[in-house]
Amino acid sequence: MHKSTNFLVTIHHQENYSFQGVIEWLDSGDKIHFRSALELMHLMEEATLKSTSSESRMRSWSNTNSLKLLKEQAV
């Protein structure tokens, strides 16, 4: 069964075409400041991977089986 992960994101300001603020992982109560949108997404991904099993992970570049199938279907 898939377990959801809940966050509260507070944007304090925007600088250098990105966001800065605080993310709170509601399931654990942990809070951390982030300095960019990329860092925010990384923190969310890390928390999600910690709270789910390896079977429900998103596709990665190292898993190219589905990419090969797409290429074969296009030909």
Image: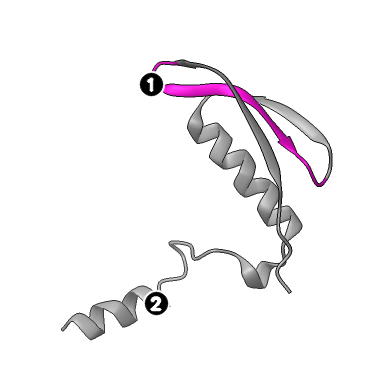
Q: Which sits in the foreground, 75 or 7?
A: 7
- Which residue is the site of mark 1? 17
Label 2, secondary structure: give it. Answer: helix
Q: Is residue 15 left or right of residue 4?
A: left
* Residue at (43, 62) in percent of width and height: 61
Amino acid type indicated by mark 1: Tyr
Residue toward you, 4 or 33 = 4
- Is residue 10 visible in the rendered structure shown here? yes
Q: Is 21 one of the magenta-colored residues?
A: yes
- Which residue is tagged 2? 66
Pointer 2 local density, CA inside 10 Å: few below 14, some 14–19, many at least 20: few
> What segment carries the magenta color?
15-27
Q: Marks 2 and 1, Cα distance to the nearest angstrom?
A: 34 Å
Q: Quadrant of the C terminus?
A: bottom left
- Quadrant location of the N terminus in the rendered image: bottom right
Rendered image quadrant of residue 16:
top left
Discs 2, 1 touching: Cβ within 8 Å: no
User: Could you classify mark 1 by the number of other residues whose Cα lies within 10 Å: few (under 14), some (14-19), or many (20 or more)?
Assistant: few
Q: Inspect the image, locate mark 2, and give the three-letter code of the amino acid beneath it.
A: Ser
Mark closer to the observer (2, 1): 1
Q: Who is closer to the viewer here, 52 or 26?
A: 26
Dot label at residue 49: none
Q: Position of residue 30 (x, y in %)?
A: 80, 35
For image coordinates 44% across by 24% down, the residue present is 18
